[in-house]
Image (cartoon, rainbow, N blue to C red):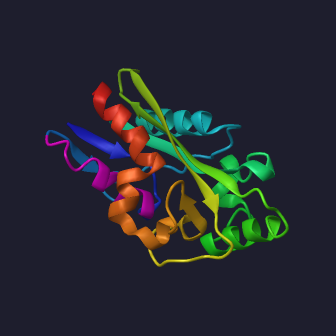
Amino acid sequence: MHLLLGTRNDGKIRELQALLVDLREVELLTYRDQPFSDVREDGKCFRANALKKARQICAETDLPVLAEDAGLEVEALKGAPGVRSARYAGEKARDKENVAKLLKALESVNDRNARFVCVAVLRFPDGRELIAEGELKGVIADEPRGDYGFGYDPIFIPEGLSQTLAELGPTVKNEISHRRRAIEQLKKEL
């Protein structure tokens, strides 16, 4: 079976490939193997964006598609950046710009509790859909630390740990991440 990863984010592709490596009967495809159009992420929640991406890419390619939407929610900021995580500092913002804006917003805030959220959707050409959610709780660090990962990884310290995801590296991140928790649920349903 072919399964198209419905993202153009190379960091997410690497993580998904690592998380799905044990699916022996599945050949993972990326946008490089099977191009697809951009999907405008204009939903009000992660679920809406993940469903939109999976449905649109599946309809366009006639392949099973695994799409997800994920982001960071900070309690003191009423859930921001949320679905705008990748565009928090602007439509074409880079990771460092998003991190800088978030740290600025939290400068005088004591409550730094946050969580990463992921909603994953597996859409088949016959219309069947599997949906799973995962979360990883933690706190926001005072400054970026570490060289691994992408997005907010350099400032997110998982609950019970003292290092950021960017310090922990990809192996540990893939063992505990919100994305892994969602993907593991989908794999059970498969």
Mostly what secondary structure, the magenta segment?
helix
Place of residue 125 in the rendered image (x, y in percent of width and height, measured from the top left):
36, 27
Q: Residue at x 36, y 28 (%)?
A: 124
Q: Position of residue 63 (x, y in %)?
A: 33, 36
| Extreme residue in the right direction | 108
Residue 84, percent from left and from top: 69, 52
**The quadrant where residue 88 appears:** bottom right
Q: Can residue 35 be seen?
A: no
Q: Which residues are magenta?
A: 11-24
Q: Is residue 158 magenta?
A: no
**Residue displayed at 31% across by 25% down:** 189
Tell me: 175 left or right of 75: left
Front residue (pair 94, 1): 94
Q: Would residue 56 be visible to someone looking at this image?
A: yes
The quarter in which the N terminus is drawn is: top left
Nearer to us in this view, 148 or 66: 148
58 on left or right of 102: left
Residue 123 vs 176, above or below: the answer is above
Q: Is residue 100 left or right of residue 169?
A: right
- Residue plotted at (81% across, 70% down): 107
**Quadrant of the frame with the C terminus:** top left
Q: In the shown orientation, is residue 80 left or right of residue 117? A: right
Residue with the most extreme left position: 24
Above or below for 156 versus 21: below
From this view, report whether residue 150 is shown above or below residue 189. below
Residue at left 71%, top 58%?
112
The image shows a total of numbered marks equal to 0
How far across and how far down the image is residue 168, in percent? 42, 68
